[in-house]
Amino acid sequence: MACAVSQYLLNRHSLLLGERSQCNSDCVAKVESLLQRLPVLVQRQNINEEDVSRISNLGETLQLLLNYLGSVHPCTGSIDDFQKLVVVLGEKLDLINCLLKSLMSKSGPLSENFDILELMLRNYLDQMQSMFPCDIKLMHEVASDIIQDEGARHVWARNLGACTRMVDYRTFLKSVVEPELIPQVQAMECGEYVGKLSAAFVQYLEYFLNFPKDGLVTTYKWSRIVSLFGPFPRFVRNFLRFAMGWGFIGLISRLRATWLLQHSPRCSVVIRLSRTHPGYVAFTYKDHTGAIKHRLNADANGKVIPLEVFLPSTFPQYTFVQHRVNVGAILRTSLKDYACSFDGYVQ
């Protein structure tokens, strides 16, 4: 009996390794195909220098992804989870390929939302490198240990299991958001906002955790959002204040952020997701002299500084501009339409 079980496990392991190898090979081929398309895209008519730089950035990220896929060898206990991410990555690469095909037949500048493609791949790469490092020695023995905030780590372990690396988005809503977060939001609702604030909270949370949509919430995603708006005991309060309040304008370019501030008073600031540094928040602000500048919420060692600490210390007398991201419109839009749209999705 023991020999039969051992043989079954050995066969299962070999099958999983074969599936992983095939998934990796498929993704590698897709990345290589995209890299071949980019030089053709640069030859489009009326393309500007900024767009050439953006296409170059996409190429650099694709090359980094190619290097990672060729080097990673997840350990036995993590192969299933690794494969899930690779399958999702392959689907996104297919979408990017279709989008680039359509863009190659057109002329004119790229939309400012084109950057979502490169940022999405950077996020996937950073997530996979964190959860499944090329050096197996760096792999967390317990899946939830990747979650830096202690409170957030306990919530994940209690509701989903310490050894669980990822769950589908609906499971996360049912197991974590509804029992752990929504009661805190409801405690802040009053008058005409009863029920509405909770619905808006869930919508904004989806923007951070499931856009572009992949239907998964991982330990990496959960750790990153709490790092921004934590610590966990004050996560809901900070999320309502900084993500859902005035001034947060989502994934928007420096140019559009600068345009929004041109007619704002001095000592004004907007919060946006960094396009070049996944996991960080960028701030575009007009200082007391009227100069418009940009900054990340990072310390000297590159560590993320929570917004509740960074904002009061860096912008103590600043006010948020009266604009915010139109999350509802973004979530109703497909990734392809979003990437091609010239709409900044700011209201």
Image: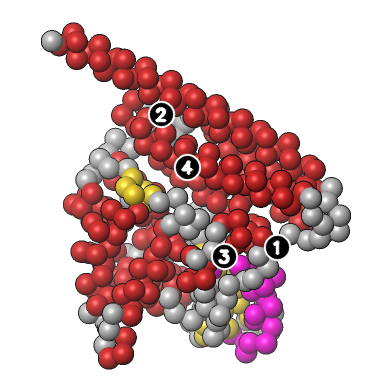
Q: Where residue 51 appears, x then y in whole percent? A: 76, 56
- Quadrant position of the C terminus in the picture: bottom right
Of labels 4 and 2, earlier in sequence is 2
**Residue at the image point whose x is 28% and y is 80% from the top:** 195
**Residue at the image point whose x is 52% and y is 42% from the top:** 91
On screen, residue 346 versus residue 151, left or right, reads right
Q: Where residue 17 appears, x then y in whole percent? A: 41, 22
On screen, residue 100 versus residue 274, left or right, reads right
Q: Which residue is mark 3?
A: 251
Which residue type carries mark 1? Ser
Image quadrant where residue 294 sits? bottom right
Regarding residue 128, the answer to whether it shows in the image is no
Residue lying furthest top in this view? 3
Residue stretch rendered in magenta on the structure = 250-267
Image quadrant where residue 60 sits? top right
- In the rendered structure, does residue 266 fall within the stretch colored magenta? yes
Looking at the rendered image, the disc whose residue lies closer to the viewer, 3 or 4, is 4
- In the rendered structure, does residue 10 fall within the stretch colored magenta? no
Q: Which residue is mark 4?
A: 88
Of labels 1 and 4, earlier in sequence is 4
| SS at badge 1 | loop
Quote the CA–CA distance across marks 1 and 4.
Answer: 25 Å
Q: How many marks?
A: 4
Which residue type carries mark 4? Val
